[in-house]
Image (cartoon, helix red, strand yellow):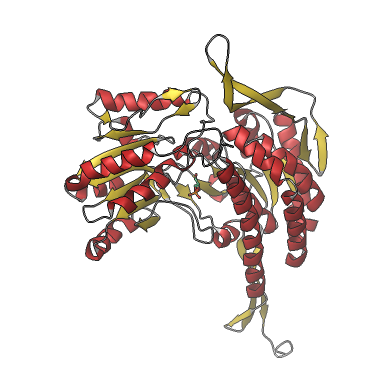
Amino acid sequence: EVHQREYLSGGEMKTWNGEVSEVYSPVGFWGEDGTFKRKLIGTYPVCTEKEAFEALDAALEAYDNGRGEWPTMSIANRIKCMERFIFKMSEQRTLVVKLLMWEIGKSYADSAKEFDRTIEYINATIDALKDIDRQSSRFEMAEGLVAQIRRSPLGVVLCMGPFNYPLNETFTTLIPALIMGNTILFKPPKHGTLLHYPLLRAFQESFPKGVVNTIYGRGAVVTPGLMASGKVNVLAFIGSSKVANDLKKRHPKINRLRAVLSLDAKNAAIVTKHADLNQAVSECILGALSFNGQRCTAIKLIFVQKEVADEFLKLLSDAVANLKFGLPWDKDVKLTPLPEPNKTEYLTDIVNDAIAKGARVVNENGGETSASFFFPAIVYPVNENMKLYREEQFGPVIPVIPYEDIEEPITYQIDSPHGMQVSIFSNDAKEISSLIDPFVNLVSRVNINSQCQRGPDVFPFTGRKDSAEGTLSVHDALRSFSIRSLVTTKMTETNKN
Ligand code: G3H
């Protein structure tokens, strides 16, 4: 068990003596009363608005209107601090990976990948920053002016990540914001809080005082005041669009607040009669069920052309039956317990809604639950009257829709409030090229014969409509958390040389 009493603010590890929140793992045991009990694995501080404002003051002081040690530090020295952080973070790998498994039920393989991907992301960010630095040492000349174009920080950045990638996605905003010279307030996600605790000292020992500050407590209590203060310059949030919109509403100068958001999505896959069905199935399984479908990039709806629907469903059901269920540390496990309480009930409801409206679960044991496990349900035929057509299930339910006319999936995408990604499965080159154009202007990434996904991390990651604001990726994130600023000099006879 990890009982956290400390939090990082103003360069100090402060001790909290107030209320704490208990953390329960999705892994648990059956009680004597026959009900499933989640295992208590630790506690963390439930700080108040007062501590949140102290953290904001510390971040403002460290930024000092752009004159602080961190925003004025040379890029080479900022990189040295970041390298020190990588070293200290790496020392905590075993514990952080263990906490990822216990807190959010992610398999060992995926937890280790999340940690290692984060270290790779930081290293790649350092390389990308070196590129930017080289560019800013070039001078541009026009109309008698010589300009040095720099990338300058924006101020205080509030970073909040999601529970499904509590470490990696939090850091895909925090790290670029930090290395660009901003100062940081960061609030770990509710599920996936404890795993940040071992990293607080690494932050403290790697960066100047007040540059990285933590916010603990109930989101509804600690974040509105920060936003309403008007002193947060960037909101970097990965989570639901509802929460993001609530937060933005509380910023008085909404138009001047920069938001970097990654939000809801309901990505469709389209399997045409010209697809290699085995390939389509293995990619759809990865896309729909990696980390139990709890990814914004997951495939959350599959359109299959009528002629091949039966064969596709049979192959898909067989593939699901071969996936291993188990605890996060079990060998080769693919499906694990769900961290959100009441999630199995929600998924059962949404499947029952489809059944009541004429669909059926086509795979054996589909939709069965035990403890915090939910056996993947392939639901067919889904139509627009069912909740599964629009609602983001964020879990192991695969709605499948038979289509006759390609206009049907196109219409789905046009009408969708989301616009993240689509996957198209076909081996007919003409068909593929005819489908790229209609979709590429509706979503932000079209995947041909592969699942939807964020990576590789050097690729831009964004979305349209309610799916995102701003762009993340190793290179784009550095731009998102900075502004181009100029220092120009007028050429005169005396300074020409
Ligand atoms: O949950 C949203 C993540 O950005 C998904 O990332 O595609 O690498 O799993 P991923």
Q: Is residue 71 above or below residue 261?
A: below
Residue lying at the far top in this picture: please name it. Answer: 33
Instruction: From the viewer's side, name the closer residue of 201 and 379.
Output: 379
> On the image, which quarter does residue 319 sit in?
top left
Q: Is residue 332 above or below residue 39?
A: below
Which quadrant: the N terminus?
top right
Q: Is residue 455 visible?
A: yes
The residue at the point 68 percent across, 76 percent down is: 137
The residue at the point 40 percent across, 56 percent down is: 445
How many discs mark residues in the rendered view?
0
- Residue 495 is situated, as x and y percent measured from the top left of the image, at 73, 86
Which quadrant: the C terminus?
bottom right
> On the image, which quarter does residue 365 sit in?
top left
The residue at the point 62 percent across, 62 percent down is: 124
> On the image, which quarter does residue 476 sit in?
bottom right
Horizontal relation, residue 171 to residue 242: left or right: right
- Residue 314 is situated, as x and y percent measured from the top left of the image, at 27, 40
- Residue 193 is situated, as x and y percent measured from the top left of the image, at 65, 35
Instruction: From the viewer's side, name the closer residue of 467 and 168.
Output: 168
Q: Is residue 415 visible?
A: no
Q: Is residue 2 above or below residue 487?
A: above
Q: Is residue 326 above or below residue 489?
A: above
Horizontal relation, residue 219 to residue 43: left or right: left
- Residue 412 is situated, as x and y percent measured from the top left of the image, at 27, 44
